[in-house]
Each structure stands twice: as structure tokens, then as C-alpha cells.
């Protein structure tokens, strides 16, 4: 009999295991992977954007926008910076509050060592089949037998990144306890072009430029054209608010007075002048599409207005996302209304906790999702 069973040994599960064990609780974390922190090890292309120093409630998508506040205040970005420094791990400030490590694998290993040092136990390469409560005790059935615990923490994440073993197991388990799961979908994911712009995206594959995407898909940063559509930081952030059938309004030249800029080169061919504001291939495509040829001075006021609108309000209607295999996170998940925001414990099922990506909490791009994992795992670990 364990005091705490934790299903999942990812970012939230490892943090929770460390905190539970530090309190003297006999703790067992179970995970399908052969190593703990599998997704941490490949995060950020191996660089691990482990937090964002500006993390606050406004950086998260959640049906209850206030839910994240307590956990974020209990375990802050600076608490994880302290963890990194204690373990001698590099901390790289990449601007906009984003902190990276050069060694994602080392971050996962440090979390694992800490949990082991506190006395936590791990069962890896194990398949979780079911979980239930019997006579006030939680029972977890696996391919290696059954385990019992006085508390149970669901930390199995969502279906994003199935190539790393992610699945919908978490919502399946939660629903068996009578918890409501909100519809899940890929988040922080590239968007696939519709038929009208698919040829453009293929032609411009590899071209990148800074953009600003208008509300309700508010985002700012780089946009990257791909063979199938668009990606890049601005698009990944915009994907959090995008729904099927919606159109993105993209400013291809943020903060640029297009008419004024073009007017500085009246004798220059329009496509060449436009290439001073945009990547050359994109400028050429826009000119061909809009019929803007000849010198800038030859454009009518109406044509200049149309050109300006094409740059500041470029419309892109995706036909879908690139799916869970390309998504960094899962939107939706277990409804936070079931849980205490302070402890992550289910209000109607004492001893049952839920943390990390499995909950209906999704952060923007830039370290916010790992910070939520640390914070929610810590909060549950102080009480489970």
C-alpha cells in the first residue's frame, strides 16, 4: 500500500513525486515510457524552454481564467530557476521572459534524481489499464499487476505528441471517476492551408517573416510558410483560439506605413519596392495576384489602398490543423471546475488529484506550459 500513486512521470508527475516524497509520503509514480520526463527531453528541440518569467493567468487558455493563479503563486518561475541553479544547469535568457536550458535531457534527469533522493519510487515501461476507488482506497491495474494507494494523482498529460507515447488515457480515467472532460484538440500547432492558398504555401516553403495576427487569434512573431500551410511562433499561438471555418487576418508588415514606404521609391517597379518590405517571393506573388505592375508612381490611389490592405489584412482561412502529431500541447481536458485551485484535489472525491496538461489549462508558446506543469505538480505534491 502506497500513500500516493502518481500516474505519469512527466514534468508535472516528477514534480509532484518529489514533493510528496519530501513530506515522507510513500510515493510510486508509474509511466509507460522507459525513461521519466520523456517529453521534457525533446522539448524546445532539446533546449527546453523551461519557464517564462512573466507567466500569469492571462497567458493561459482555460474555461476558468482564475484557476491557474494559486498554483502559479505557490511555485513561481523563479523557484524553478533556483532548481536549475542548484543542479548547475545552464539558464539562457532568450528575451520576452523565455528561459532555456541547453540540455533538456539534463533537466529531466535532475528532476528524476531529486525525486529518487527524496524516496519516491518509479515503475517505468508499465501499461496502465484502469483506475478506481474501492473502500476508500485507490486501485490501479497495470500489465504488471495492481497497485493500491491512499491518494491518486492523474498526471498522464493529453494526446499531443503521440510519437512520444501521448494518448487520451487521462480523460478516459478521469471520466471513470465521474469527472467531465471538455473537448480536446491540438494546440500550439501548424495550420494547413485551404485550396486557395495551398499553392502559395508550397511555393514559399521556408520563407519566414514577422507578422501580427489580429484578434481573436491575437499573436505576434514570426510566420513560416511550409509545404502544407503556415507555422512559426505567431501561428502556433494563434492556433489556440482558431476554430474550423474561421479566417485569420494577418498583418504582413506590422507598424509599417505601406503608402509612405512605397512612395519613397516612385520610379521603382512595384514588386521590387514591395520586396523591400517583404520576402521577395511573397512580394512577387502579391503583385501578380493584385495586378500591381510597373513603377510605383503609376499606381492609382485606389490601387495603393488595395495594396496596403493586402499587406495589413492578409486573409488566411485554414482547412484544419496539422494534428496531434505536430501539436506541442493539448487544448481542453479535464474540467477545472471539479478541482480546488489551491490543492488540485477533486472537490467531490477526496484523495484524487489532477495536474499538468491533462487539466483544461493550456499556455501560450514560450515556456508557459512547462511552468504550469511545475506549479500544478508542486501544489498537488504539497497535499496528496
Image (tube, rainbow, N blue to C red):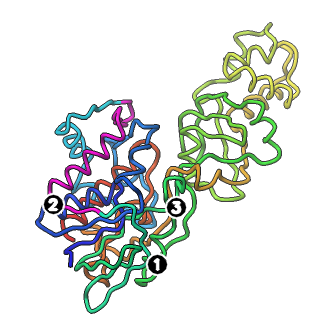
Residue range (magenta) = 94-122
Residue at 31 percent across and 70 percent down: it is: 153
Label 2 crowd (10 A; few <14 / some 14-19 / many >=20):
many
CA distance for labels 3 and 1: 17 Å
* The disc label shown at residue 180, or none: 1
Element class at badge 3: loop
Q: Are dots 3 and 1 in contact, CB under 8 Å?
A: no
Examine the structure image and report whether residue 113 is included in the region drawn in magenta.
yes
Towards the viewer: 261 or 282: 282
Residue that mark 2 sits on: 119
Task: Work out whether mark 3 precedes mark 2 in sequence or the reverse, and give the earlier one.
Answer: 2
* Image location (x, y in percent) of residue 74: 21, 57
CA distance for labels 3 and 2: 30 Å
* Image location (x, y in percent) of residue 140: 35, 78
Query: In screen coordinates, is 278 left or right of 363?
Result: right
Residue at 19 percent across and 41 percent down: it is: 82
Label 1 crowd (10 A; few <14 / some 14-19 / many >=20):
some
Q: Which of the 4 quarters of the picture holds residue 246? A: bottom right
Task: Work out whether mark 3 precedes mark 1 in sequence or the reverse, and give the earlier one.
Answer: 3
Residue that mark 3 sits on: 159
Amino acid at each position: 500500500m502506497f500513500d500516493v500513486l502518481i500516474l505519469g512521470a512527466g514534468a508535472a508527475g516528477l514534480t509532484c513525486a518529489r514533493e510528496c516524497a519530501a513530506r515522507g509520503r510513500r510515493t510510486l509514480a508509474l509511466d509507460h515510457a522507459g525513461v521519466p520526463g520523456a517529453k521534457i527531453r525533446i522539448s524546445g528541440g532539446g533546449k527546453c524552454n523551461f519557464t517564462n518569467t512573466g507567466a500569469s493567468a492571462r497567458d493561459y487558455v482555460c474555461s476558468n481564467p482564475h484557476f491557474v493563479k494559486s498554483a502559479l503563486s505557490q511555485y513561481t518561475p523563479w523557484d524553478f530557476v533556483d532548481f536549475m541553479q542548484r543542479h548547475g544547469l545552464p539558464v539562457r535568457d532568450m528575451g520576452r521572459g523565455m528561459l532555456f536550458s541547453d540540455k533538456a535531457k539534463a533537466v529531466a534527469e535532475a528532476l528524476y534524481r531529486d525525486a529518487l533522493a527524496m524516496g519516491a519510487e518509479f515503475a517505468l515501461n508499465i501499461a496502465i489499464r484502469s483506475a478506481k476507488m474501492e473502500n476508500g482506497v485507490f486501485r490501479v491495474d497495470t500489465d504488471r499487476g495492481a497497485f493500491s494507494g491512499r491518494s491518486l494523482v492523474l498526471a498522464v498529460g493529453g494526446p499531443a505528441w503521440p510519437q512520444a507515447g501521448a494518448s487520451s488515457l487521462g480523460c478516459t480515467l478521469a471520466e471513470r471517476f465521474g469527472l467531465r472532460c471538455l473537448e480536446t484538440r491540438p494546440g500550439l500547432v501548424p495550420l494547413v492551408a485551404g485550396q486557395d492558398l495551398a499553392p502559395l504555401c508550397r511555393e514559399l516553403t521556408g520563407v519566414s517573416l514577422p507578422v501580427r495576427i489580429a484578434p481573436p487569434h491575437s499573436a505576434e512573431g514570426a510566420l513560416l510558410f511550409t509545404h502544407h500551410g503556415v507555422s512559426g511562433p505567431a501561428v502556433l499561438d494563434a492556433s489556440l483560439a482558431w476554430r474550423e471555418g474561421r479566417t485569420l487576418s494577418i498583418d504582413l508588415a506590422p507598424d509599417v506605413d505601406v503608402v509612405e514606404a512605397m512612395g519613397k521609391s516612385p520610379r521603382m517597379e512595384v514588386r521590387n519596392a514591395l520586396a523591400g518590405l517583404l520576402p521577395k517571393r511573397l512580394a512577387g506573388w502579391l503583385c501578380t495576384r493584385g495586378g500591381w505592375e510597373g513603377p510605383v508612381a503609376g499606381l492609382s490611389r485606389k490601387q495603393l489602398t488595395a495594396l496596403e490592405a493586402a499587406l495589413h489584412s492578409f486573409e488566411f482561412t485554414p482547412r484544419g490543423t496539422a494534428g496531434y502529431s505536430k501539436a506541442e500541447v493539448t487544448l481542453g481536458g479535464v474540467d477545472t471546475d471539479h478541482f480546488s485551485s489551491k490543492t488540485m484535489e477533486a472537490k467531490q472525491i477526496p484523495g484524487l488529484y489532477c495536474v499538468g496538461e491533462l487539466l483544461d489549462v493550456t499556455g501560450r508558446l514560450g515556456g508557459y506550459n512547462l511552468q504550469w506543469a511545475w506549479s500544478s505538480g508542486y501544489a498537488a505534491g504539497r497535499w496528496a
